[in-house]
Amino acid sequence: MSPPLTSRRAPARPQSNAFVVLTLLILLVHLSLVADGWRFGLNRLQPPSPSSSPRRPRGDLLAAAAASASSSSGGGGGTATVSKGEGGAADSGGVVSVQQVFVCTNRWCMQRGAGATMGSFIGLTPYGSQMRVQGVDCLGRCNKGPNIRLLKSNGTFEELSYIDSVEKVYDVFTSQLGISINQSSADCLKLNFQGNAHLDKNEVDQAIGCYDKAIPLSHKGQEGVLRVMRSTAYLQRAYTHFMQFRELVDQIAQPLPDQAVFGLLERVHASSPFLVVPILSRLTQVYEARGRLYRLTTFQFSLFEFAVHKACHDALTATHILPNFTKSWIRAGHGLRFLRRFKDAIACYQVVVKIDPSTAKELEQEIELLEKVQRYVANAREQGVSEESLVITLDALGVFACS
Protein backbone atom coordinates (compact mmCIF):
# COMPACT_ATOMS: atom_id res chain seq x y z
CA MET A 1 0.00 0.00 0.00
CA SER A 2 1.42 3.36 -1.08
CA PRO A 3 1.99 6.04 1.57
CA PRO A 4 -0.62 8.82 1.75
CA LEU A 5 0.03 11.93 -0.31
CA THR A 6 0.84 15.06 1.61
CA SER A 7 0.66 18.59 0.18
CA ARG A 8 3.93 20.46 0.20
CA ARG A 9 4.47 24.13 -0.58
CA ALA A 10 7.21 24.77 -3.15
CA PRO A 11 10.15 26.70 -1.74
CA ALA A 12 10.18 30.38 -2.68
CA ARG A 13 12.63 31.12 -5.53
CA PRO A 14 14.92 34.15 -5.25
CA GLN A 15 13.84 37.21 -7.22
CA SER A 16 15.38 37.41 -10.72
CA ASN A 17 18.18 39.93 -11.26
CA ALA A 18 16.72 40.77 -14.70
CA PHE A 19 13.52 42.04 -13.03
CA VAL A 20 15.51 44.35 -10.78
CA VAL A 21 17.52 45.72 -13.72
CA LEU A 22 14.34 46.29 -15.76
CA THR A 23 12.73 48.17 -12.88
CA LEU A 24 15.75 50.42 -12.51
CA LEU A 25 15.78 51.18 -16.26
CA ILE A 26 12.10 52.15 -16.21
CA LEU A 27 12.75 54.44 -13.24
CA LEU A 28 15.70 56.11 -14.99
CA VAL A 29 13.69 56.71 -18.16
CA HIS A 30 10.86 58.21 -16.12
CA LEU A 31 13.22 60.55 -14.28
CA SER A 32 14.81 61.59 -17.59
CA LEU A 33 11.44 62.45 -19.10
CA VAL A 34 10.49 64.47 -16.05
CA ALA A 35 13.77 66.38 -16.20
CA ASP A 36 13.33 67.12 -19.92
CA GLY A 37 9.81 68.34 -19.32
CA TRP A 38 11.05 70.62 -16.51
CA ARG A 39 13.77 72.09 -18.73
CA PHE A 40 11.27 72.54 -21.56
CA GLY A 41 8.93 74.38 -19.23
CA LEU A 42 11.72 76.69 -18.06
CA ASN A 43 12.73 77.44 -21.62
CA ARG A 44 9.17 78.37 -22.51
CA LEU A 45 8.97 80.74 -19.55
CA GLN A 46 12.19 82.55 -20.51
CA PRO A 47 11.77 85.45 -22.97
CA PRO A 48 13.69 85.14 -26.24
CA SER A 49 17.07 86.80 -26.43
CA PRO A 50 17.04 90.12 -28.31
CA SER A 51 20.15 89.11 -30.27
CA SER A 52 18.72 85.85 -31.48
CA SER A 53 17.53 85.86 -35.07
CA PRO A 54 13.99 84.70 -35.87
CA ARG A 55 13.65 81.14 -37.12
CA ARG A 56 12.83 80.82 -40.77
CA PRO A 57 10.04 78.46 -41.74
CA ARG A 58 11.18 75.31 -43.51
CA GLY A 59 9.45 73.74 -46.46
CA ASP A 60 7.76 70.36 -46.22
CA LEU A 61 10.51 68.51 -48.04
CA LEU A 62 13.34 69.91 -45.95
CA ALA A 63 11.35 69.46 -42.75
CA ALA A 64 10.80 65.80 -43.64
CA ALA A 65 14.51 65.39 -44.27
CA ALA A 66 15.33 67.07 -40.95
CA ALA A 67 12.86 64.88 -39.08
CA SER A 68 14.26 61.68 -40.57
CA ALA A 69 17.90 62.57 -39.92
CA SER A 70 19.70 62.29 -36.62
CA SER A 71 22.25 64.58 -35.12
CA SER A 72 25.74 65.21 -36.40
CA SER A 73 28.70 63.15 -35.22
CA GLY A 74 29.35 65.55 -32.35
CA GLY A 75 25.84 65.25 -30.93
CA GLY A 76 22.82 67.47 -31.13
CA GLY A 77 19.29 67.06 -32.45
CA GLY A 78 18.18 67.24 -36.06
CA THR A 79 19.65 67.46 -39.51
CA ALA A 80 20.49 71.16 -39.48
CA THR A 81 22.94 72.31 -36.84
CA VAL A 82 23.96 75.93 -36.42
CA SER A 83 27.27 77.04 -34.93
CA LYS A 84 29.30 80.23 -34.93
CA GLY A 85 32.20 80.35 -37.40
CA GLU A 86 35.62 81.35 -36.22
CA GLY A 87 36.08 85.09 -35.95
CA GLY A 88 32.53 85.77 -37.06
CA ALA A 89 30.63 88.56 -35.39
CA ALA A 90 26.93 88.99 -35.85
CA ASP A 91 25.83 91.89 -38.02
CA SER A 92 24.10 94.41 -35.79
CA GLY A 93 20.72 95.11 -37.23
CA GLY A 94 21.69 93.90 -40.72
CA VAL A 95 20.07 91.26 -42.88
CA VAL A 96 21.83 87.89 -42.61
CA SER A 97 22.35 86.29 -46.01
CA VAL A 98 24.09 83.17 -47.25
CA GLN A 99 27.38 83.97 -48.96
CA GLN A 100 28.58 80.50 -49.86
CA VAL A 101 27.25 76.96 -50.16
CA PHE A 102 29.66 74.09 -49.55
CA VAL A 103 28.68 70.68 -50.90
CA CYS A 104 30.49 67.61 -49.61
CA THR A 105 31.94 65.73 -52.59
CA ASN A 106 33.83 62.91 -50.89
CA ARG A 107 33.22 59.40 -52.18
CA TRP A 108 30.59 58.54 -49.59
CA CYS A 109 28.43 61.54 -50.36
CA MET A 110 29.01 61.10 -54.10
CA GLN A 111 27.66 57.57 -53.84
CA ARG A 112 24.56 59.02 -52.18
CA GLY A 113 23.96 61.58 -54.95
CA ALA A 114 26.14 64.58 -54.09
CA GLY A 115 26.86 65.08 -57.79
CA ALA A 116 23.18 65.83 -58.41
CA THR A 117 23.17 68.06 -55.30
CA MET A 118 26.11 70.07 -56.59
CA GLY A 119 24.57 70.33 -60.06
CA SER A 120 21.23 71.40 -58.60
CA PHE A 121 22.75 74.25 -56.60
CA ILE A 122 24.76 75.43 -59.61
CA GLY A 123 21.83 75.05 -62.00
CA LEU A 124 19.28 76.80 -59.78
CA THR A 125 21.45 79.68 -58.55
CA PRO A 126 19.98 82.82 -60.16
CA TYR A 127 22.09 84.59 -62.75
CA GLY A 128 24.06 87.45 -61.17
CA SER A 129 23.77 86.09 -57.63
CA GLN A 130 26.71 86.80 -55.30
CA MET A 131 26.32 83.41 -53.63
CA ARG A 132 29.05 80.93 -54.54
CA VAL A 133 28.72 77.14 -54.73
CA GLN A 134 31.81 75.10 -53.98
CA GLY A 135 32.62 71.43 -53.43
CA VAL A 136 34.58 70.41 -50.33
CA ASP A 137 36.35 67.22 -49.37
CA CYS A 138 34.35 66.22 -46.30
CA LEU A 139 31.86 67.72 -43.84
CA GLY A 140 31.57 64.70 -41.56
CA ARG A 141 28.40 62.66 -40.96
CA CYS A 142 29.21 60.56 -44.02
CA ASN A 143 26.35 58.15 -43.28
CA LYS A 144 23.87 61.03 -43.56
CA GLY A 145 25.03 62.45 -46.89
CA PRO A 146 24.80 64.30 -49.13
CA ASN A 147 25.73 67.06 -46.68
CA ILE A 148 25.90 70.81 -47.29
CA ARG A 149 27.05 73.82 -45.28
CA LEU A 150 25.52 77.29 -45.64
CA LEU A 151 28.03 80.01 -44.70
CA LYS A 152 26.23 83.18 -43.63
CA SER A 153 27.27 86.81 -43.73
CA ASN A 154 27.42 87.06 -39.93
CA GLY A 155 30.04 84.31 -39.68
CA THR A 156 27.72 81.52 -38.62
CA PHE A 157 26.98 78.46 -40.67
CA GLU A 158 24.21 75.92 -40.92
CA GLU A 159 24.68 72.32 -41.95
CA LEU A 160 22.01 70.20 -43.60
CA SER A 161 21.99 66.49 -44.37
CA TYR A 162 20.14 64.20 -46.79
CA ILE A 163 19.99 66.91 -49.49
CA ASP A 164 19.88 64.35 -52.28
CA SER A 165 17.37 65.61 -54.85
CA VAL A 166 16.41 68.63 -56.93
CA GLU A 167 13.26 69.05 -54.83
CA LYS A 168 15.25 69.36 -51.60
CA VAL A 169 17.71 71.81 -53.13
CA TYR A 170 14.75 73.83 -54.43
CA ASP A 171 13.33 73.88 -50.91
CA VAL A 172 16.68 75.06 -49.48
CA PHE A 173 16.61 77.99 -51.91
CA THR A 174 13.02 78.99 -51.21
CA SER A 175 12.74 78.25 -47.46
CA GLN A 176 16.26 78.50 -46.07
CA LEU A 177 17.81 81.11 -48.34
CA GLY A 178 14.69 83.08 -49.18
CA ILE A 179 15.55 83.04 -52.89
CA SER A 180 12.71 82.74 -55.37
CA ILE A 181 13.29 79.99 -57.94
CA ASN A 182 11.21 79.34 -61.03
CA GLN A 183 9.49 75.98 -60.65
CA SER A 184 9.99 75.29 -64.35
CA SER A 185 13.75 75.58 -63.90
CA ALA A 186 13.63 73.00 -61.10
CA ASP A 187 11.48 70.64 -63.18
CA CYS A 188 13.85 71.10 -66.12
CA LEU A 189 16.86 70.29 -63.95
CA LYS A 190 15.16 67.18 -62.58
CA LEU A 191 14.44 65.92 -66.11
CA ASN A 192 18.03 66.70 -67.05
CA PHE A 193 19.35 64.48 -64.24
CA GLN A 194 16.91 61.73 -65.14
CA GLY A 195 18.06 61.86 -68.74
CA ASN A 196 21.71 61.71 -67.68
CA ALA A 197 20.98 58.68 -65.49
CA HIS A 198 19.31 56.91 -68.42
CA LEU A 199 22.23 57.81 -70.67
CA ASP A 200 24.72 56.34 -68.20
CA LYS A 201 22.78 53.06 -68.40
CA ASN A 202 22.75 53.25 -72.22
CA GLU A 203 18.97 53.70 -72.16
CA VAL A 204 19.11 56.10 -75.08
CA ASP A 205 15.41 56.28 -75.93
CA GLN A 206 14.42 57.13 -72.34
CA ALA A 207 17.23 59.71 -72.13
CA ILE A 208 16.10 61.46 -75.31
CA GLY A 209 12.52 61.45 -73.99
CA CYS A 210 13.63 63.24 -70.79
CA TYR A 211 15.62 65.82 -72.76
CA ASP A 212 12.65 66.38 -75.10
CA LYS A 213 10.47 67.24 -72.09
CA ALA A 214 13.14 69.38 -70.42
CA ILE A 215 14.07 71.67 -73.31
CA PRO A 216 10.69 73.51 -73.50
CA LEU A 217 10.96 74.24 -69.75
CA SER A 218 14.53 75.53 -69.90
CA HIS A 219 16.05 78.98 -70.06
CA LYS A 220 18.83 79.72 -72.54
CA GLY A 221 21.71 78.43 -70.44
CA GLN A 222 19.90 75.22 -69.58
CA GLU A 223 18.83 74.74 -73.19
CA GLY A 224 22.44 74.81 -74.39
CA VAL A 225 23.52 72.09 -71.96
CA LEU A 226 20.42 70.02 -72.67
CA ARG A 227 21.02 70.15 -76.41
CA VAL A 228 24.59 68.98 -75.89
CA MET A 229 23.34 66.06 -73.83
CA ARG A 230 20.64 65.19 -76.36
CA SER A 231 23.27 65.40 -79.10
CA THR A 232 25.34 62.89 -77.12
CA ALA A 233 22.31 60.60 -76.85
CA TYR A 234 21.66 60.82 -80.60
CA LEU A 235 25.30 59.98 -81.30
CA GLN A 236 24.95 56.90 -79.11
CA ARG A 237 21.83 55.93 -81.03
CA ALA A 238 23.70 56.49 -84.30
CA TYR A 239 26.50 54.25 -83.10
CA THR A 240 23.99 51.47 -82.32
CA HIS A 241 22.50 51.77 -85.83
CA PHE A 242 25.98 51.77 -87.30
CA MET A 243 26.94 48.53 -85.53
CA GLN A 244 23.73 46.90 -86.82
CA PHE A 245 24.55 48.20 -90.30
CA ARG A 246 27.99 46.59 -90.10
CA GLU A 247 26.50 43.24 -89.09
CA LEU A 248 24.19 43.34 -92.10
CA VAL A 249 27.10 44.22 -94.39
CA ASP A 250 28.97 41.16 -93.09
CA GLN A 251 25.97 39.01 -93.99
CA ILE A 252 25.77 40.54 -97.47
CA ALA A 253 29.44 39.75 -97.97
CA GLN A 254 28.63 36.03 -98.03
CA PRO A 255 29.16 34.72 -101.61
CA LEU A 256 26.26 34.04 -103.98
CA PRO A 257 26.11 31.33 -106.71
CA ASP A 258 28.52 32.32 -109.49
CA GLN A 259 28.73 31.59 -113.24
CA ALA A 260 30.13 28.11 -112.63
CA VAL A 261 26.91 27.11 -110.87
CA PHE A 262 24.79 28.34 -113.77
CA GLY A 263 27.02 26.45 -116.25
CA LEU A 264 26.43 23.29 -114.24
CA LEU A 265 22.69 23.91 -114.34
CA GLU A 266 22.79 24.10 -118.15
CA ARG A 267 24.51 20.74 -118.35
CA VAL A 268 22.08 19.17 -115.88
CA HIS A 269 19.13 20.60 -117.83
CA ALA A 270 20.40 18.97 -121.03
CA SER A 271 20.56 15.51 -119.46
CA SER A 272 17.89 15.60 -116.73
CA PRO A 273 15.52 18.57 -117.07
CA PHE A 274 13.35 17.54 -114.11
CA LEU A 275 16.29 18.10 -111.67
CA VAL A 276 16.70 21.75 -112.61
CA VAL A 277 13.31 22.94 -111.29
CA PRO A 278 13.96 22.42 -107.52
CA ILE A 279 17.48 23.86 -107.89
CA LEU A 280 16.14 26.98 -109.59
CA SER A 281 13.46 27.30 -106.89
CA ARG A 282 16.13 27.22 -104.20
CA LEU A 283 18.26 29.79 -106.04
CA THR A 284 15.23 32.07 -106.31
CA GLN A 285 14.75 31.93 -102.54
CA VAL A 286 18.43 32.74 -101.97
CA TYR A 287 18.32 35.79 -104.23
CA GLU A 288 15.03 37.04 -102.77
CA ALA A 289 16.50 36.76 -99.24
CA ARG A 290 19.58 38.64 -100.39
CA GLY A 291 17.35 41.39 -101.86
CA ARG A 292 15.55 41.78 -98.52
CA LEU A 293 18.91 41.94 -96.80
CA TYR A 294 20.05 44.73 -99.14
CA ARG A 295 16.89 46.75 -98.42
CA LEU A 296 17.30 46.24 -94.67
CA THR A 297 20.93 47.34 -94.89
CA THR A 298 19.95 50.50 -96.74
CA PHE A 299 17.24 51.21 -94.16
CA GLN A 300 19.69 50.72 -91.28
CA PHE A 301 22.14 53.09 -92.91
CA SER A 302 19.35 55.67 -93.24
CA LEU A 303 18.59 55.35 -89.51
CA PHE A 304 22.28 55.92 -88.79
CA GLU A 305 22.37 59.04 -90.97
CA PHE A 306 19.15 60.40 -89.47
CA ALA A 307 20.43 60.03 -85.89
CA VAL A 308 23.69 61.78 -86.82
CA HIS A 309 21.79 64.66 -88.44
CA LYS A 310 19.72 65.09 -85.26
CA ALA A 311 22.92 65.08 -83.18
CA CYS A 312 24.52 67.70 -85.43
CA HIS A 313 21.45 69.93 -85.27
CA ASP A 314 21.43 69.92 -81.46
CA ALA A 315 25.19 70.41 -81.16
CA LEU A 316 25.35 73.27 -83.67
CA THR A 317 22.39 74.96 -81.98
CA ALA A 318 24.24 74.66 -78.66
CA THR A 319 27.30 76.37 -80.17
CA HIS A 320 25.13 79.45 -80.81
CA ILE A 321 23.66 79.38 -77.29
CA LEU A 322 26.93 78.59 -75.46
CA PRO A 323 29.71 79.66 -77.83
CA ASN A 324 32.45 79.12 -75.22
CA PHE A 325 31.26 75.67 -74.16
CA THR A 326 33.80 73.27 -75.67
CA LYS A 327 31.58 70.19 -75.44
CA SER A 328 29.09 71.68 -77.89
CA TRP A 329 31.85 72.18 -80.49
CA ILE A 330 33.27 68.71 -79.86
CA ARG A 331 29.86 67.06 -80.33
CA ALA A 332 29.32 69.07 -83.50
CA GLY A 333 32.73 67.98 -84.80
CA HIS A 334 31.98 64.33 -84.07
CA GLY A 335 28.63 64.49 -85.83
CA LEU A 336 30.06 66.20 -88.92
CA ARG A 337 32.81 63.61 -88.92
CA PHE A 338 30.23 60.80 -89.15
CA LEU A 339 28.56 62.66 -92.02
CA ARG A 340 31.90 62.77 -93.90
CA ARG A 341 31.92 66.57 -93.78
CA PHE A 342 35.52 66.64 -92.68
CA LYS A 343 36.23 70.27 -93.52
CA ASP A 344 33.43 71.43 -91.19
CA ALA A 345 34.52 68.95 -88.50
CA ILE A 346 38.06 70.33 -88.65
CA ALA A 347 36.68 73.86 -88.20
CA CYS A 348 34.80 72.78 -85.06
CA TYR A 349 37.89 71.15 -83.58
CA GLN A 350 39.93 74.28 -84.29
CA VAL A 351 37.42 76.34 -82.30
CA VAL A 352 37.85 73.94 -79.37
CA VAL A 353 41.63 74.42 -79.47
CA LYS A 354 41.16 78.19 -79.52
CA ILE A 355 38.86 78.09 -76.47
CA ASP A 356 40.91 75.52 -74.55
CA PRO A 357 44.57 75.37 -75.66
CA SER A 358 45.17 72.32 -73.44
CA THR A 359 43.29 70.21 -76.02
CA ALA A 360 45.68 71.18 -78.83
CA LYS A 361 47.93 68.13 -78.62
CA GLU A 362 45.06 65.65 -78.85
CA LEU A 363 42.93 67.46 -81.42
CA GLU A 364 45.76 68.41 -83.75
CA GLN A 365 46.37 64.72 -84.39
CA GLU A 366 42.69 64.30 -85.21
CA ILE A 367 42.76 67.31 -87.51
CA GLU A 368 45.81 65.93 -89.36
CA LEU A 369 44.06 62.58 -89.84
CA LEU A 370 40.88 64.22 -91.17
CA GLU A 371 42.85 66.34 -93.64
CA LYS A 372 44.38 63.19 -95.13
CA VAL A 373 41.05 61.38 -95.22
CA GLN A 374 39.38 64.37 -96.86
CA ARG A 375 41.60 63.99 -99.95
CA TYR A 376 40.91 60.25 -100.11
CA VAL A 377 37.14 60.74 -99.90
CA ALA A 378 37.19 63.36 -102.65
CA ASN A 379 38.97 60.94 -105.00
CA ALA A 380 36.62 58.07 -104.07
CA ARG A 381 33.52 60.14 -104.80
CA GLU A 382 34.92 61.14 -108.19
CA GLN A 383 35.20 57.43 -108.99
CA GLY A 384 31.55 56.83 -108.04
CA VAL A 385 32.05 54.99 -104.74
CA SER A 386 28.78 54.84 -102.77
CA GLU A 387 28.43 56.51 -99.37
CA GLU A 388 27.76 53.14 -97.74
CA SER A 389 31.04 51.77 -99.08
CA LEU A 390 32.83 54.93 -97.98
CA VAL A 391 31.51 54.56 -94.44
CA ILE A 392 32.63 50.94 -94.22
CA THR A 393 36.11 51.83 -95.50
CA LEU A 394 36.46 54.85 -93.21
CA ASP A 395 35.40 52.80 -90.21
CA ALA A 396 38.05 50.19 -91.09
CA LEU A 397 40.62 53.00 -91.18
CA GLY A 398 39.59 54.16 -87.69
CA VAL A 399 38.23 57.52 -88.84
CA PHE A 400 35.08 57.17 -86.71
CA ALA A 401 36.99 56.19 -83.57
CA CYS A 402 36.30 59.43 -81.69
CA SER A 403 35.58 59.75 -77.98
Image (cartoon, rainbow, N blue to C red):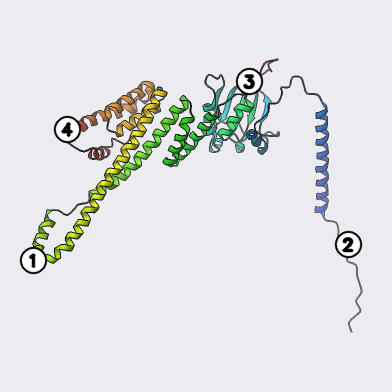
Q: Which residues are magenta?
A: 85-98
- Residue 107 at x, y = what percent? 53, 36
Separation of residues labelled 2 and 3 (CA atoms)? 72 Å
Residue 157 image-quadrant placement: top right
Can see residue 269? yes
Q: Single out the mark in the foreground, 4 or 3.
A: 4
Q: Is residue 146 magenta?
A: no
Q: Is residue 279 above or below residue 327?
A: below
Between marks 1 and 3, how big is the CA–CA gap? 102 Å
Disc 4 to disc 2, C-alpha distance: 113 Å
Which of disc 2 and disc 4 is earlier in sequence?
2
Name the residue beneath numbered marker 3. Answer: 97
Q: Amino acid at mark 2?
A: Ala
Select label 4 or label 2 by which is in front. 4
Q: Which residue is mark 2?
A: 12
Sooner in the amino-acid sequence: mark 2 or mark 3: 2
SS at mark 2 in the image: loop
Q: Earlier in the sequence, mark 4 or mark 3?
A: 3
Three-letter amino acid code of the residue under disc 4: Glu
Which residue in the rendered view is the most extreme toward the bottom?
1
